[in-house]
Image (tube, coloured by chain):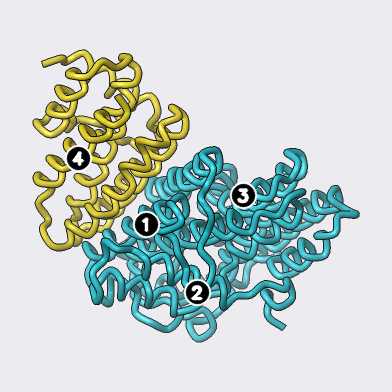
Chain colours: A cyan, B yellow
């Protein structure tokens, strides 16, 4: 069973709203490279994890405001999709989910502006007047100013995402990167976004502030565990299973947790430290294999487990709430 | 020319920019920004409000400029340009929220969106900065 089915959410309705953001933009010619590109990104699919987190967060609220929850969910998914468009350029990734990435299909300048368009349009749509937001089936009511501020504050999260990327940029092939630096980067790059999604849903549905904060903390721990697991995949899976060569992060200079732990091994450290942008693919491949077979991997798993357990302890503090089952489904999904 | 407004606004913005970004607002004394500063001085507004409006315009100007300078063959510089533009855009939202300028932001959002569409057709942003001045003028007239 899919995650959205388990959570009882209508993924098709979310996808229709995502499309309507672009389709109702009167400033956008049709056809145009921007319109076609955004619709293609939406149609490429995805699990819509961020909207689902917003919706689960909203179920902890006292007063369900479907309109605001959906605006928030859609706006955050656009923010996420736009950040992926820019990340793919930065990471020089030409493929995503088996399809050419936007900059590969068009060019870098186009992809940068499409990403920018997506953020500005999503915010305009989410905070707009009903006539500017009309999805065919259900026009959204006008937004209160305090809710508009809340949405703008969420859009400001771009600065936090950037801080994670700046950290990564400043630490390319930096083998002296500390565990604390890695955790800080991971928090900015991944964990805070997940935390904000849950809290934004809770806030949109008038959850009490303590509950909203617990959901934020839960999302942050879950996000840390999720990113560490993702960093592990880069070493433990092959090109066939993750769609990129094993060790792709390290090859691009991105020093992740398995590398940091592997550097503690005196027999491995010199081989890792010799790697730079000019090292051959074969040399990278050999070092990546050695890291994959080293004690660094179970050590990473243990740290991911610690964050997972931390998330579960926070979840336990929300025990007794009717939405608890949904939160548990999310936790199981991310921590599997 | 009121250089104080320009300099005070740049100093205020620089305080909001995380040192880890290494962004320096060095290109903020050109004609487009000065034109908007002059426009603001023609209105009876509190000095702090003038600074906020000018700061939002500076952030849009700086973000557009960074995203226009894309060194496609140098990944480090390309990354920096993309991140700088994204960060400055995010800061626009943050500043507008902090200074309670939703109406200004809601005016700038469609403009910022249209800029992206326009830049795909014509990479020269000069015309767009003139439009930004008109947007601010219309906003100030309406809120006066």
Residue that carries the numbered disc 1 in the rendered image: A121
Identified at 23% across, 34% down, the residue is: B136
Residue A89 appears left or right of A107: right
Q: Earlier in the sequence, mark 1 or mark 2?
A: 2
Which residue was labeled with disc 4? B132
Q: Are marks 4 and 2 on the same chain?
A: no
Which chain does tag 1 point to?
A
Q: What is the secondary structure assignment of the residue under circle 3?
A: helix
Please state the horizontal and vertical placement of residue A246, each as a whole percent of the image: 49, 75
Do the residues indicated by labels 1 and 4 lie within the same chain of the protein? no
Are marks 4 and 3 in one subunit? no
Q: What residue would you read off at disc 3?
A: A200
Secondary structure of residue under mark 1: helix
**Chain where mark 2 sits:** A
> Mark 4: few, some, or many residues within 10 Å (few <14, many ≥20)?
many
Q: Earlier in the sequence, mark 3 or mark 2?
A: 2
Examine the rendered structure and indicate whether residue A118 appears above or below residue B16. Answer: below
**Residue shown at the point (12%, 28%) measured from the top left:** B35
Q: Residue A52: in sight, yes or no? A: yes
Q: Specify which label sits upstream in the sequence, 1 or 3.
A: 1
Q: Secondary structure at mark 4?
A: helix
Q: Residue A184, image x and y in percent?
A: 55, 44
Give the crowd class for mark 3: few <14, some 14-19, many >=20 residues within 10 Å.
many
Q: Is residue A306 left or right of residue A94?
A: right
**C-alpha gap between disc 3 and disc 2:** 21 Å
Q: Do the CB atoms of the residues marked 3 and 2 lie less than 8 Å apart?
A: no
Query: Distance between the Cα atoms at labels 1 and 3?
Result: 19 Å
Dots 1 and 2: beta carbons under 8 Å?
A: no
Distance Cα–Cα, label 4 vs label 3: 32 Å
Residue A16: image tag: 2
């Amino acid at each position: 069973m899919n995650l959205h089915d388990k959570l009882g959410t209508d993924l098709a309705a979310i996808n229709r709203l995502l499309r309507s953001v672009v389709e109702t933009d009167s400033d956008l010619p049709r056809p145009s490279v921007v319109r076609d590109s955004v619709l293609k990104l939406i149609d490429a699919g995805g699990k819509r994890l961020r909207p689902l987190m917003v919706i689960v967060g909203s179920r902890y609220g006292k007063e369900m405001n479907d309109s605001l929850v959906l605006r928030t969910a859609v706006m955050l998914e656009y923010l996420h999709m736009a950040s992926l468009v820019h990340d793919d350029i930065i990471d020089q990734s030409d493929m995503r989910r088996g399809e050419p990435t936007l900059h590969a299909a068009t060019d870098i300048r186009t992809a940068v502006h499409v990403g920018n368009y997506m953020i500005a349009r999503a915010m305009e749509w989410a905070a707009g007047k009903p006539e500017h937001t009309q999805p065919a089936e259900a026009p959204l009511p006008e937004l209160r100013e305090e809710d508009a501020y809340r949405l703008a504050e969420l859009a400001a999260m771009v600065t936090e995402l950037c801080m994670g990327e700046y950290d990564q940029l400043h630490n390319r092939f930096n083998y002296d990167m500390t565990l604390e630096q890695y955790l800080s980067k991971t928090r900015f790059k991944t964990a805070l976004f997940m935390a904000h999604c849950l809290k934004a849903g809770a806030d949109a549905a008038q959850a009490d502030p303590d509950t909203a904060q617990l959901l934020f903390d839960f999302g942050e721990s879950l996000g840390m565990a999720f990113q560490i697991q993702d960093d592990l995949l880069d070493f433990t899976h092959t090109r066939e299973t993750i769609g990129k060569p094993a060790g792709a992060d390290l090859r691009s200079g991105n020093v992740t947790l398995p590398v940091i732990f592997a550097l503690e091994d005196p027999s491995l450290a010199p081989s890792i430290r010799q790697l730079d942008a000019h090292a051959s693919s074969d040399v990278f491949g050999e070092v990546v294999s050695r890291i994959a077979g080293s004690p660094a991997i179970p050590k990473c798993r243990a740290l991911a487990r610690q964050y997972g357990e931390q998330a579960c302890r926070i979840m336990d503090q929300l025990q007794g709430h009717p939405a608890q089952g949904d939160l548990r489904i999310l936790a199981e999904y991310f921590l599997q | 020319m009121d250089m104080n407004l320009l300099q005070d606004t740049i100093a205020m913005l620089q305080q909001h920019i995380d040192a880890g970004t290494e962004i320096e607002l060095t290109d903020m004394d050109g004609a487009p920004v000065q034109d908007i500063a002059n426009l603001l001085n023609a209105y009876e507004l509190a000095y702090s409000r003038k600074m906020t409006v000018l700061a939002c315009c500076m952030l849009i100007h700086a973000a557009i400029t960074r995203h226009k300078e894309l060194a496609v063959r140098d990944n480090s510089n390309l990354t920096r340009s993309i991140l700088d533009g994204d960060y400055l855009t995010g800061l626009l939202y943050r500043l507008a929220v902090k200074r309670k300028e939703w109406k200004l932001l809601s005016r700038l959002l469609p403009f910022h969106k249209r800029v992206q569409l326009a830049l795909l057709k014509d990479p020269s942003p000069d015309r767009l900065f003139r439009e930004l001045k008109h947007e601010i003028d219309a906003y100030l007239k309406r809120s006066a």
